[in-house]
Image (spheres, grey):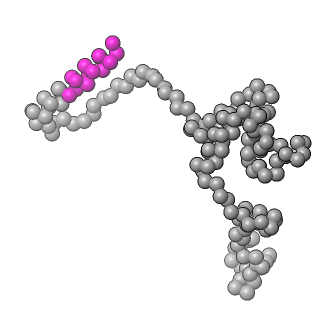
Amino acid sequence: MALFEKGNKKGNRFTSENQPKKRGRGNLSVLKYIQTTTGKKVNPQSSKEEILKVIQHLYESSTAELEPLLKDPTDRTKPNKDTPIWVLNIIAAINSDIRYGRTSTVEMLFDRVFGKATQNIEGEINANVSNNVDLSALSDEELIQYNTLLDKIRNSAKNGKE
């Protein structure tokens, strides 16, 4: 007998009287978790446009301009406590890329601000279209128009190859 079949008396089956102490999965979001852990009210203030402007400023700045954001003014060995973590992370990634001659962080930032570059793909496609349509329902005038359109299509295809 399977574990959840009717009549199975093994295990702790839930009934109207036997309910779990914690119902459901809970509704503790990440913001609530941060709030309860740090004791601070979590209220993100930045919009997408503001974040994109900050990113744009970061990749347009020189290393000397980024230094005050990165280092604590009182102790140059520690990170600046007032700079958001994500900004510190981006600056550290840019500095690492500079040190090792990479461009991956700047490319990622450009993709975020400007969108990924589109690539045009060109190719020649030959398609043989067969006509399995019953043309007997067409009148003589409609057949003449149909043949005229087919001739135009064939001529434009020939001119396109030249």
**Residue 4 position in % (x across, y down):** 71, 72
Observer-nearest of 122 and 42: 42
**Residue 15 position in % (x across, y down):** 71, 83
Q: Magenta span has 161?
A: yes
Observer-nearest of 88 and 132: 88
Q: Is residue 149 above or below residue 79?
A: above
Q: Measuring 15% from the left and 30% from the top, which residue is drawn there?
A: 145
- The secondary structure that dominates the magenta segment is helix
Magenta span? 149-162
Observer-nearest of 8 and 49: 49
Q: Magenta span has 28?
A: no
**Residue 86 position in % (x across, y down):** 74, 47
- Left or right of residue 72, residue 16 in this image: left
Q: Is residue 154 above or below residue 65?
A: above
In which quadrant of the rendered image does the N terminus lie? bottom right
In the rendered image, the residue lying farthest to the front is 74
